[in-house]
Amino acid sequence: MNSKQLLLAALIVIDFGTASAQVYDDMTKFKQLQQELPTPNAYRTASGAPGHEYYQQKADYVIDVEIDDDKQILRGTETITYWNNSPDPLTYLWLQLDQNLYAKDSETKKLQTGTLNNEMSFDDMAGLHVAYDGDMRLEYVHDNKGQALPYTIVHTMMRIDLPQPLKPHTSYSFQIKWWHNLNDRDKVGGRGGMEFFPAENNYIYTVAQWFPRMAVYNEIQGWQHKQFLGRGEFTLPFGDYKVKITVPEDHIVGATGELQNADKVLSATQRERFAKAKTATTPVLIVTEQEARETEKNKAKGKKTWEFNALNVRDFAFATSRKFMWDAIGVKFGNRTVMAMSYYPKEGNPLWEKYSTKVVAHTIQSYSAHTVEYTYPVAISVHTKDIGMEYPMICFNGGRPDPDGTYTERTKYGMISVIIHEVGHNFFPMIINSDERQWTWMDEGLNTFVQYLAEMEWDRNYPSRRGPAYKIVDYMKGDKTQMSPIMTNSESIWQFGNNAYGKPATALNILRETVMGRELFDFAFKEYCRRWAFKHPSPADFFRTMEDASAIDLDWFWRGWFYGTEHVDLKLDNVKWMRINTGDPEKENAITRDDIAKAPQFIGDTRNKTSIPKPLIDQDTTLRDFYNRYDPLKVGDGMEDAYKNYVAKLTDEERQVLSSGLNYYELQFSNVGGLPMPVILEFVFSDGSKQVERIPAEIWKMDSKVINKVYSFAKEVTAVHLDPFLETADVDVNNNNWPPTMQPSRFQIYKNRDQPEPNPMRQSGTGR
Amino acid sequence: MRKQFAYACFLFAAIYLAAGTAKAAVLRHDFHVSVTQITYNTQTQALEITVKIFADDLERSVLALGGDDLRLGDPREATHADEVILGYLRNRLSVKVNEQAMPYDWVGKEVEIDALWCYLEIKDILHLTSLEITNRILTEIFEDQANVVHIEAYAQKKSLFLSKSMLSERISF
């Protein structure tokens, strides 16, 4: 490539870093978010923090529940004490009856779309033949004096009409008795329910959404009583729980909260082991596999009642079975000890004994470092076949080895990932209590982001599915008519997993690595967690806090990544190389002569050199005159004097620029994808050295489609790479290089490999 | 044939309801998506096809349709896994090149924990005027299965989103 020459040093200054031919177009990408976000007020400030009049309601529960292991029925009575901390009198209360999702005439079933053709999906077939009758049967709803309260059930919601309005800063207690059939998860699905083990006629119960629960009332939308349709999860107020769980006496129970009557339900040996686990360095089995295997062979006739207390939680779940073994380890947070624990049947081993509790311990430590400290007394992982579902302090996780005790790598990492994810949900949404019914991304997206950090801390080669920018490319570059923005209500999202888990997790990772930097991001993210721990944040509180704590204007980022569906595709259009024309005839004329000599020669000229050995002007020299002799590049004729005069008029600084010998490069970029992102460049020089330049995304304010940028280097540039560290989720990396280079596709890499990669596990001949 | 398939469905319904209808926070994977990249390589005059599928979904579908446990990526992977996968794909992913159905050849596969990457190729395409893709991968088990197809030819890019409501699409160049 020939360099073009800048004729005047002064021109350079004008050309530096400015965009050419600007059109002030499409500024909506950088428009502030004012109109999209709610007006700040005394409840929620413009800085994203709770305001001075922030309030939240409280719901305390005292519950007696019994699991009927013969009929798989749950029966319960509860006393709810509802605290109205709002400034508003309430004439009625709304409760959630989530189990009504399984009513035979539930809205969920009515809203399911389906097609009937000669290729029915299994989902379709299942949907047509569900026999489970699972809604909540209320035996009474009455006040503390036993007086019946009028109530109305609207699908999964129930309104209780109060005798008098509940005034601000007062509380009201009432009682409900109910029962429902537990759902067999293998047959009808569900987050809670039970799994049946036919070989020994035994059940593992994982019980969730099992009691009438208070809905959230706040200043954002009054009562949050959007129907539970199955996808948009839960929105619940904090409260204190006292729960007595009656089960067959040979069951082991794990639950939200701390066990209150260990002396009544555990043996002396079990209590001793539990005490030992508090200070142990490796998980201690409180119920061993051998013991669990013995227990599950019989069925005890008697019952036992386990009592748990849980403070400041938004929900309560539990698991119970005679199949459970149980291990635990104490995790220190200053002077506090949190018990990380797991409950699993023999079917979970050898995986569960080896990993589950250690993963729980790692997760609460890792998340505590990235968010807020884990303040609950226990963190529990319960084995299931193949789901993952979270509740305060307890979650139900899949990952089951094969019956012969071996397991695939996929099963192993699937299990560890799901445990990190579900235990991680303790932070989002159990502690930082966002509205899941409204916004899936606020818990799933944030949690998936921290999950990725915890996975990297587990093993730097961890096969994380989501997190790195480049992993979202296949989704982002897809058909836009089939995408919804992240800021979409939970029930209306298209491509749920990528939209609500993958994209927000990736976006936060990009903020952390590229837009804000780790230090600013981590400070702001922790500030969000600190401000909203044990409170109810909204999206605006998150967006505002991240800006407020960092002094980085992120409106363009929220707009592009959270409110839009465009993807990132930046393109390096071309690179122009220029040098300064010093004006010194001695130097410049030599360079010009050199350029002419190096220039490509027309083929005819080359051939004529031999085919015309002597042209006429060489044969007859009288044909020559001044113009045949004139060499415009020859230095002389006052050229040097003119140069000296020119230099003499320059300032010292100007003279320095003139003699610097710098190479100037004008780069042109275009934004093909539409989503503005920082421009990250790697220059490679002729001596092999490299230099990275990072341009903030605001460069696209100058022109949203095409920008130019000039760089100067003493060395000559041989290559330029855009997004060299794969940090912007650029969907096309083939237009990112100068000189243009094509990255081989995955297909080509595979095909060009001589031999398929050997499978090391296969060679070793064993999976374990 | 139709009757047989219905039977397989019922058999499978019992196994599969959980994953199909439970919408817990994270199932094995909380979404049902395959991604296919089809690139026309003008130099080799071949259509290069890369299909990424969740390995466990494919395994379960094969099992439910009466096949063997493939154990993809495991030391004890079924020796005939490649044939089974190719058979499955040929049944559920078809490509019409210039209005003519063209079978693809098996190039190979890779398994990355939960993702199965299949490499397929259609050779001797001198010129490409149109492509019609029919993609029914895993729609037999998931109502919400989405099959994304990215196509690249003659510097043009197009992305298709195929699902039960639209199983095939045709594009021309």
Image (cartoon, coloured by chain):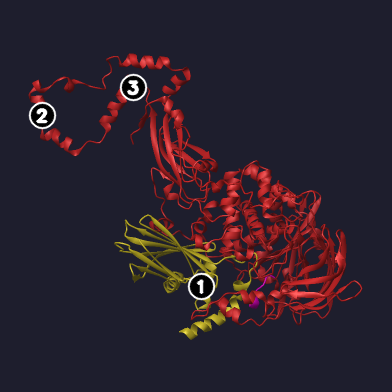
x, y percent for residue A723 = 49, 45
Question: Please, what is the three-letter code of the amino acid marked with disc 2?
Answer: Pro
Asked if the magenta segment contains residue A736, the reply would be no
x, y percent for residue A84 = 83, 61
Drawn side of residue A657 relative to residue B10, left or right: left
Q: Which chain is red?
A: A
Drawn side of residue A130 relative to residue A82, left or right: left
Q: Mark 2 vs mark 3: same chain?
A: yes
Report which colour depicts chain B.
yellow
Return the residue at label 1: B139
Return the residue at label 3: A587
Disc ID at residue A615: 2
- Measure the alpha-carbon separation of dots 1 and 3: 72 Å
Dominant secondary structure of the residues highlighted in magenta in the image: loop
Question: Please, what is the three-letter code of the amino acid marked with disc 1?
Answer: Thr
Residue closer to the observer: A46 or B147: A46
Tell me the chain of label 3: A
Q: Residues within 10 Å of mark 1 (few under 14, many from 20)?
A: many
| Residues rendered magenta in the picture | A187-191
Say whether marks 1 and 2 touch (CB < 8 Å).
Answer: no
Which residue is at a point 33% across and 23% down the rendered structure image? A588
Say whether marks 2 and 3 touch (CB < 8 Å).
Answer: no
Question: Please, what is the three-letter code of the amino acid marked with disc 3?
Answer: Lys
Instruction: Tell me if residue A248 can be seen.
Output: no
